[in-house]
Structures are given as structure tokens and as C-alpha cells.
Amino acid sequence: MREPSVGIASCVRCGTCCERGGPVLHVEDMGILRDHHAIFRHLVTIRAGEPVFNPVTNRVERAEREMVKVKGRGGSWCCSFYRREDSSCTIYDFRFLECRLLKCWDPSDLMRVMGRGTIRRSDVLNEGDPIRSVIALHDEECPLSELSALVVRAFVEDEDGTARRRLSDLIRRDSALRSYALNDLGVESAFELFLFGRTVRDIVSDAGLVFGTGRRDSVRQGRRGPDKAGAVDKGERMC
Ligand code: SF4
């Protein structure tokens, strides 16, 4: 984990924490959602198996479980509630558990709750909401559990192209189901990241593999690659 900030004992509103990424949501944050201080359009789901940055080990690792967090903006993980103009939080009075606990000069309180009591999409969606069955189908058709292994194989031992074909297949299925939800069911595009998480194409591309720029439905190798342990390059992957 990052070294605690030296020489300060209270928040100096430098904004670094909020710029590094919004919080993961916990059971204690459900009231904030119920009262609509944050809604679906503010959230992104990290699906089980997705490569994410673990601040405890300081590595990118596969998420062990599904998590919901505040999404970033402008192509970065900077919290969408952070206002750069005056380094402020636009929902400060209702901010999330991790935000309340985070003290960069002493991360011990935050560390105690990290990975514990986090919520999933099913905790937030209404019982009987038909989108639940589309999410379940998406999870079944486009699992991320095998993604890291496939990326490693695509880089180092994929002479017959099996891993690349499987990655292409996952990307196609992911795209088709999102398209079905948005175009056929009329789901708002602003909800897509919460309902289905980041696209498989984006996750694969973060690993340095590029989809479909040459032959249709092909995956090819980009500049970056997996490290020795099979985790993808830390790059922009902040969670
Ligand atoms: S919710 Fe507010 S305090 Fe928490 S990371 Fe976002 S801007 Fe910062």
C-alpha cells in the first residue's frame, strides 16, 4: 500500500484520494442510494475476476467478488463527485463509508473495512426487476473468471490462436448483450457501467491486447503485457 502521508494529521484537501478513485460501496452506504444522493448513473460494477488494483498488496489482481463503486469521469478513475475547481466533494454531507474513514496519514481505519461488507448489484436492484435476468445471462455468457489466464496465454503460448479466439468470443457476447439491453429493452446508457461493468473489450485492451482493428473479430497484441505473475500492467487500473 502507498506510504501514509508524512507531516500532516488532518485533511488538507489536496484531492489526491478522490483523484485516485471513488470508493467501493458497503452495506452502510445503502441509505445514500435509497435517498438518491447517488444513483445508478454514478456507479460502476467491478465484476468477479476483473483485474483491479489492490492497494493492500500494491498489485493488480483479480477481484475475488463483485463490487460496486463510484465511477470515474473523463476517462480516469477520478471520483465523479469530486469537484476540482475547489477541491470539494459534491456530496460531502452524505459521503460513503470509505470516504469517511479514509485518512491518508493513517489508513488503518480504512484497511479494517476494505473487502468486508461490500455490496453487489443484486443488493441495489429491485426484486423482480427484469434486468436481473439479463445481468445473470451476461455473467454466464461473459465470465471474467478466465480472463487473466486467457490474456497471459494470448501473449505467451497461443500458437494455434485458441486464447485469442476465446477472447474475441467473450468480447462479441459482451457487446451483443449490452446492445440488447440498451437498444431492445430501452435501458439508459448511463446505467450500463453499473448493470454490466466495464466492457470486456476495455478490460482486454487495458492488458495490452487490441480488438478488431485489422481483421474483423480479431484480438492482437498491443504494447503492454502481463507481468510474470499473470496480473496485467497496473497502468490506469485504479479501483
Ligand atoms: S465521494 Fe466525495 S469524498 Fe468520496 S472519493 Fe468522491 S469526492 Fe472524494
Image (cartoon, rainbow, N blue to C red):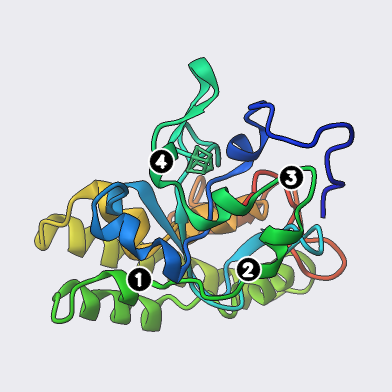
Instruction: Give the mark, 1 or 2, whose residue is nearer the N terminus.
Output: 2
Measure the alpha-carbon separation of dots 1 and 4: 24 Å
Residue type at mark 4 is Asp
Q: Circle 3 is placed at which residue position?
A: 223
Q: SS for tag 1?
A: helix
Give residue 113's mark.
2
Measure the alpha-carbon separation of dots 1 and 3: 34 Å
Q: SS for tag 3?
A: loop
Residue type at mark 1 is Arg
State which mark lies toward you, 3 or 2. Answer: 2
Measure the alpha-carbon separation of dots 3 and 4: 43 Å
State which mark lies toward you, 1 or 4. Answer: 4
| Image location of residue 63, percent across then percent down | 61, 71
Q: Circle 4 is placed at which residue position?
A: 93
Quadrant where the image shows the N terminus:
bottom right
Measure the alpha-carbon separation of dots 3 and 2: 36 Å
Image-based side of 2 in relation to 214, left or right: right
Is the distance from the Cβ of mark 1 to the nearest ligand 1 atom less than 8 Å?
Answer: no
| Image location of residue 87, percent across then percent down | 55, 23
Q: Residues within 10 Å of mark 2 (few under 14, many from 20)?
A: some
Q: Specify whether residue 224 is in view.
A: yes
Instruction: Give the mark, 3 or 4, whose residue is nearer the N terminus.
Output: 4
Measure the alpha-carbon separation of dots 4 and 2: 20 Å
Give residue 121's mark.
1
Is the distance from the Cβ of mark 2 to the nearest ligand 1 atom less than 8 Å?
Answer: no
Measure the alpha-carbon separation of dots 1 and 2: 19 Å
Quadrant where the image shows the C terminus:
bottom right
Instruction: Give the mark, 1 or 4, whose residue is nearer the N terminus.
Output: 4
Residue toward you, 127 or 163: 127
Q: Specify whether residue 161 is in view.
A: no
